Amino acid sequence: MSEATPNTFALDGEDLPFEPGDTVLQAARRAGRYIPHLCWHPDYAAHGSCRVCTVKVDGRAGAACTLRAAAGQEVESDTEALNAQRKTLLQMLFVEGNHFCPSCEKSGNCLLQATAYQMGMEGPHFEEFYPDRPVDASHPDLLLDFNRCILCELCVRASRDVDHKGVFAIAGHGIGTHLVVDSASGRLADTDMALTDRAASICPVGVILPKRRGFVVPIGERRYDADTVADPARQEAS
Amino acid sequence: MTVDSAGDAAGTAAQDDAAAVDALLARHANDPHALVQVLREVQALRGWLPRETLARVGDGLGLGLAQVEGVATFYRFFHTRPVGACRVLFSDNVTDRLLGSEALMADLCRRLRVAPGEMRADGRVSVDRCSCTGLCDQGPALLIDHRHVVTRLDGGRVARIAELIDAGVPVAAWPAEWFEVVDNVQRADVLLGTPVVPGAALAAAVQRGRQAMLDEIVRSNLRGRGGAGFATGTKWRLCRDAPGAMHYIVCNADEGEPGTFKDRVLLTRHADLVFEGMAIAAWVVGAREGRVYLRGEYRYLLEPLNAVLQRRREARLLGTAILGCEGFDFDLQIHVGAGAYVCGEESSLIESLEGKRGTPRIRPPFPVEQGYLGQPTTVNNVETFCAAAHIALGGGAWWSGIGTPKSTGTKIHSVSGDCERPGLYEYPFGTRIGRILEDCGARDTQAVQVGGPSGTCISAFEFGRRIAFEDVPTAGAFMVFDRSRDMFEIARGFAQFFAHESCGFCTPCRVGTALVVKRMDKLAAGRGSRHDIDVLYELDALMHTSTHCGLGASACNPLRDTIAKFRPAYERRLQSLHFEPAFDLDAELSVARAVTGRDDPASHLEPVHE
């Protein structure tokens, strides 16, 4: 690149460098800047489903995780309007599933909860859907509580691309979209999933949980108890 | 198994199925990209897809069961639970409703003693709804066994259908006139009115040469007829110039926008012209293979279309050395969809062609760079290919002289709803909406939904506006509503459509479309407040800017238009101008009532009105 076109763009008015091929979110993350996100993870290709990272680039809305950074772009992210929109998206995710933070083992380590705090969410705003989603406790070492699934597909990607097991997939459509398990019975016990798999630790919310570890780390000493999700070292839960 | 009562018979049937499934897989060369076609053909064996069958398909294609399950449960026409031996689907577009489809469906269910969406206990029949079947000009319409369409349904036909189903008479033996689909061409211009001898346009293109043919398309200023209006010449050039081992031409015949049925007629009357346009595109782009993505609702067109393809192969208009021109090799296959509106979006369509869930891709890369199987792919609408064939004959300058400078040529409108003469009307771009209303015999018109639910709702004071990309753009639907119609109910029907068709991938569309339906239902029940209208506005604004694809972004268009233009239709439903909770305590007690088997007045919070 010549000096005439430096590889920088402006995020909320501040210049950020980027590498060729970077998305806006990748460049921001590397610089330690926070653009709220749930389904994006630095170890995986962009997915673009949660839409929480939606920003405005030169006035046009788009997901920061899929938009390519380009020299001279003006990116707005931390604005009142965009954060209000993020809060609404978070509220949608909360009412879609069954999220009861006080009784959830993931509380304090949960990316959804931490992001909701960060965006100032104080209530569900919309009516709850209360879906009927039975848990799968069949596996000796892992519990699946589908009530908390936000369909980020990180487990799908980790199991397929890292563990090479393909334990998870997405099924259904519309509001009935849900996570399924790859076995004849549909139960996790009948897969070759192991506690040491990357998919077992990737879940940013409380769907995939190790058994017999409940509240080993007490409330008050958890990931997001001392630091916020905007902290450069805390932007992902897993 | 509910269907097979005798154990032995079930065992034999399962073995037969397994052998038939293996034969089907072999016919598709065990190619995982054929998954959607395999599932469609496998389902035809038994009417639904048992889990063991999905596992067998997965094994045969080298796919996990969960992945196969994910695809099978994505498409509305695949069943992973038992369905009736006769599967009746009522087309549920608002135009079908205007013609009384809901009462007819209730009547059929009553006669057959079956609840909507459920299979009758004896496994004989199930009755449900589906999105628009593209027969709005001759509705109400039925889709039977995902294969046959019944048009012009009325009370008499419903009564006879119930008798025939009860008597176990196969659909093939039902009165043939029920399945008659008429073309209803009411006004023809270039596309519908100029006969073209098969091969003539292709010969003209070959004679012009590849670059000169592209130049004519560019000169014509032809824009895509699927709705987005991208310049066809630019698309072809980008695709031609993109590196790739293969290039593909795909015809988008997934005409899913409710109220649109022009492609149905083009594929019925002018299939040669469609295939000719595809071959011309292949000539320009350098593609050797093509696909037609035919929506599942048009399954009944598959055999006639394949017959046309065969005839064209014999006439050397498809295959190797087309028209004797060395190096011009092109052939195509028809892929039949399985009920998913979102597959009309070109990247979802490509995913579906590849045997996957029809989730829109992240773009860029665009299909012209990396489309079908990762190769450069040109996806155009049926009508666009027809136009391209005419341009090959008449030249770009001739085409660009029709219509307006920014919207050249003609456009076919699928007119339905409250008018005397529904059907196809082809006009040059720039035609006044009022003119179309006059021509189709619409009276006392309150509104027109132009371009389908994702388009624009036009009210009477705007009938002077013109059909054009620069004024009122359209993919072809033109649904007319007279003053007796309740525009709130029209908008609610569209909201239900988008919720039904959301692919479920991104948060704002998946949850937002469902929330919109909840709000509209609350208003319909007379329990709304001004706050609910504010929330609808909020959802519209959010979905417009934050969804992954155009489906979600346009899902609230009819809502926004009708609130703005027909606000009294909403306000007269408000219980108060202040906040009303969505939570209905008496409704919540229904579970308790069901569990205790009670429904007496004392089990209700409020008196029950008979």
Image (cartoon, coloured by chain):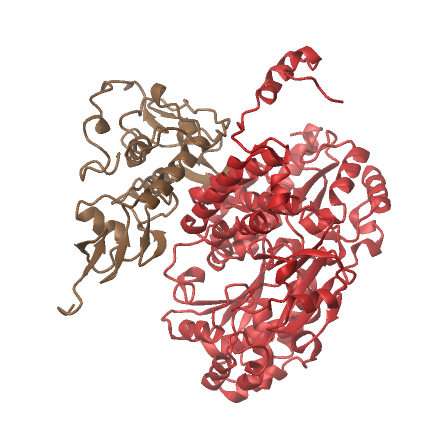
Chain colours: A brown, B red
Do we see residue B420 in this rendering? Answer: yes
Name which residue lies at 61% across and 49% down.
B566
Q: Quadrant of the C terminus of chain A?
A: top left
Residue B234, percent across and down? 44, 74
Compared with B368, B76 (above or below) is: above
Taking the image as shown, residue A98 lies to the left or right of residue B398, namely: left
Residue B2, percent across and down? 67, 29
Residue B259, percent across and down? 65, 56
Q: Quadrant of the N terminus of chain A?
A: bottom left
Name which residue lies at 44% across and 42% down.
B64
Which residue is the extreme one toward the front?
Answer: B577
Comparing B414 with A149, the one in front is B414
Taking the image as shown, residue B319 lies to the left or right of residue A10, namely: right
Comparing B170 with B469, the one in front is B469
Compared with B346, B39 (above or below) is: above
Taking the image as shown, residue B131 lies to the left or right of residue B28, namely: right
Comparing B531 with B389, the one in front is B531
Name which residue lies at 63% across and 84% down.
B200
Residue B152, percent across and down? 79, 53
Taking the image as shown, residue B563 lies to the left or right of residue B261, namely: left
Compared with B154, B377 (above or below) is: below
Do we see residue A174 in this rendering? Answer: no
